[in-house]
Image (tube, rainbow, N blue to C red):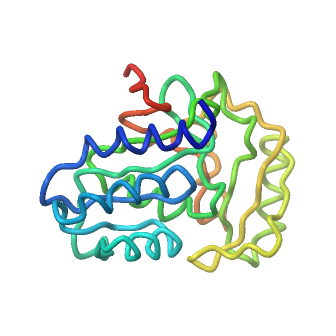
Amino acid sequence: MTADEGKRAAAERAIGFVEDGWVVGVGTGSTVAFFIEALGRIRHRIDGAVSSSEQSSQRLRAVGIAVLDLNAVGPLPLYVDGADECDPQRRLIKGGGAALTREKIIAAASEKFVCIIDPAKRVDVLGRFPLPIEVIPMARSHVAREILRLTGGQPAWREGVVTDNGGWILDIYGLRITDPLALETQLDGITGIISNGLFALRPADVVISGADLLPA
């Protein structure tokens, strides 16, 4: 199975979690693009979607799905999104598409978080993929120094990338994240960080890897 075949298979299986009349939380990325395509086929069964990025909002509108404001419709019954890495406890690294903050907000506001990945995203220990951190632009250097001091990870500024919130992205290389809960909490305490790409405090409830539903 190719990567795209795995992504499409996961996206198609995730449609089975969508019920009539729901407003669905929708994430960002290449796997989610397949989910949006599939969601478009059942657009008349749902009441709309809350999107984690302008990119996904455009895709949703293109297939005829209304994009709604979370403030007006939350909490949500379901959030479907991809991940850059997933460990056996369904803890994730996200943010390769620079939408991590809005993704965290929608995940927190949703009763069920279904993560769809191709099998290559499964790891035993998080950290092979660099950990994205969204920062206030004026705090970039301060945050980078603090992360280096606290974790030993090597921060790299993702130059030219501005998030939908006006933030900048630091990618942290060289981490082996054996305690994602502790690291997520530690990063949340650094002044200047808007959000970090660890989803351990609020992990996925369900992970679909290719066509397979992973055991809880």
68 with respect to 149 (left or right):
left
Report x, y in % for residue 187. 64, 50
Report x, y in % for residue 17. 25, 42
185 with respect to 48 (left or right):
right
x 39%, y 19%: residue: 215
Report x, y in % for residue 183. 63, 40
Observer-nearest of 118 and 41: 41
x 16%, y 60%: residue: 45
Report x, y in % for residue 86. 57, 33
Residue furthest to the left: 21
Observer-nearest of 42 and 74: 42
Q: How many marks?
A: 0
211 with respect to 192 (left or right):
left
x 24%, y 58%: residue: 42
Quadrant where the C terminus is found in the figure: top left
12 with respect to 134 (left or right):
left
In this rendering, is residue 109 above or below 91? below
x 75%, y 31%: residue: 176
* Residue 192 found in image quarter: bottom right
